[in-house]
Image (cartoon, coloured by chain):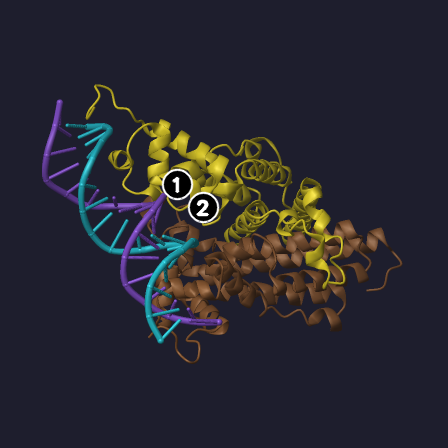
Chain colours: A yellow, B brown, C purple, D cyan
Amino acid sequence: MARPRQSLLTLQRIVGAAAALVDAEGLPALSVRRLATELGVQGPSLYHHFDTKAEIVDAVADAVVAQVDVSAFGTYPWCEALRRWARSYHAVLSAHPNIVPVLAQGPGRRPAALAMADTVYGALIDAGWSPVRATHIGALMRYLVTGSALGSFALGFPDDPRLYADYPHLHQAYLLAEHRERVDEGAFDLGLETLISGLESLLSSEFPNERA
Amino acid sequence: MARPRQSLLTLQRIVGAAAALVDAEGLPALSVRRLATELGVQGPSLYHHFDTKAEIVDAVADAVVAQVDVSAFGTYPWCEALRRWARSYHAVLSAHPNIVPVLAQGPGRRPAALAMADTVYGALIDAGWSPVRATHIGALMRYLVTGSALGSFALGFPDDPRLYADYPHLHQAYLLAEHRERVDEGAFDLGLETLISGLESLLSSEFPNERA
DNA sequence: ACCTGAACACCGTTCAAGT
DNA sequence: ACCTGAACACCGTTCAAGT
């Protein structure tokens, strides 16, 4: 067939299949031909729905960011809202680690990422932070969340005891992979709680009369 | 010529050319054929010196990590040493941002990265941290440094004012790129100093009799 | 031992040809 | 408007052939 009466492809179907492919087999597995095969069409067909492969990747990335829960900013004091947002952000990225290298580049022109940045920045300004500080805090949170989701610290150390023979303090490092979750979550928690309580005292020292 | 009396290629020359290519044009520009051209040989020649392209990439990454200064761990109290190491780490990665996605995956089997992890972990243990906490702190520092080097927060927001029309708090966001350095360095500094002073009080609260 | 050209199975993308 | 096959200029990698 050359042209079915109803289009074989929709943006939704393409992005959904692309997201599934990235989640299951990683970003390098997402090729135009492979994605087309998954959808039952030929590679060039996709170019009737997207201009470039980069647009497909961006759509996948934004669908992931759209899952982050920012609702806490309407209902909690800024400290608790920041904590809840960061935890949701972290949970979503941990569930889709293969797309994190794209998110780490910033919002670009992706609507969900821009909307999230807008909400967070607005809430920090409302809380009494200066524009410069609010920007720093937003950046810092992205550093922590993408940094932790991009590469599992624990999995960064191979499972092979012989590798660490020459490193006096790393003899147990081959066990890290086994404790992946506790290690990575513990480090993220430590970072998040340390940062939030540090920021809390910083704000109250800068503006002693501000409300919580 | 098929075989010159002295090898045309050395590991040093290959890794140096690869590093220059990555720095100048980014990781995607590093192809085997392109690198070979840069070195005045044909693509397949490189396979006499490396088994895979991934080995070349790893060698480039490790050469970058080798530039990080860990000497502070021998001469300063752990807090100041951690600060100086993190700043050096950050400076090196900021100078070679294109290779950061590789470093963010962890040390793997790269000797310089393993040596750095060994030094940092050992120093934290010596300072009185428990193995679990020392691991968390090491992870946390990698999150912050790679997260901040991977994607400039400022450059993540495109330079185009029209893009932000729909986002009430982002009307100035198009100016971020212009202030890239101040924004990114300010966020990193805020994060590093907040974390270090938070960790300092945490250690003294856990072990009130420990030396600095 | 080390470099080569030819080949294999891939890429992203373009485009004339079909309906 | 939307899907196709053929083509272009790329990939990483293998391998027999040269010296």
Could you tell me if residue B61 is visible in this image? yes
Does residue B125 lie above or below A138 as drawn?
below
Q: Amino acid at mark 1?
A: Val
Circle 1 marks a residue in which chain? A
Q: CA distance from mark 2 to mark 1?
A: 8 Å
Q: Position of residue B75 (x, y in %)?
A: 74, 73
Furthest-right residue in this view: B209
Q: Position of residue B173 (x, y in %)?
A: 41, 50
Q: In the drawing, does residue A13 fall left or right of residue B204? A: left
Q: Amino acid at mark 2?
A: Val
**Crowd around label 2: few <14 · some 14–19 · many ≥20 (10 Å):** some
Q: In the drawing, does residue C16 fall left or right of residue C9? A: left
Which residue in the structure is indicated by mark 1?
Answer: A57
Image quadrant for the N terminus of chain A? Answer: top left
**Crowd around label 1: few <14 · some 14–19 · many ≥20 (10 Å):** some
Image quadrant for the C terminus of chain A? Answer: top right
Toward which corner of the image does residue A193 lie, by quadrant?
Answer: top right
Which residue in the structure is indicated by mark 2?
Answer: A102
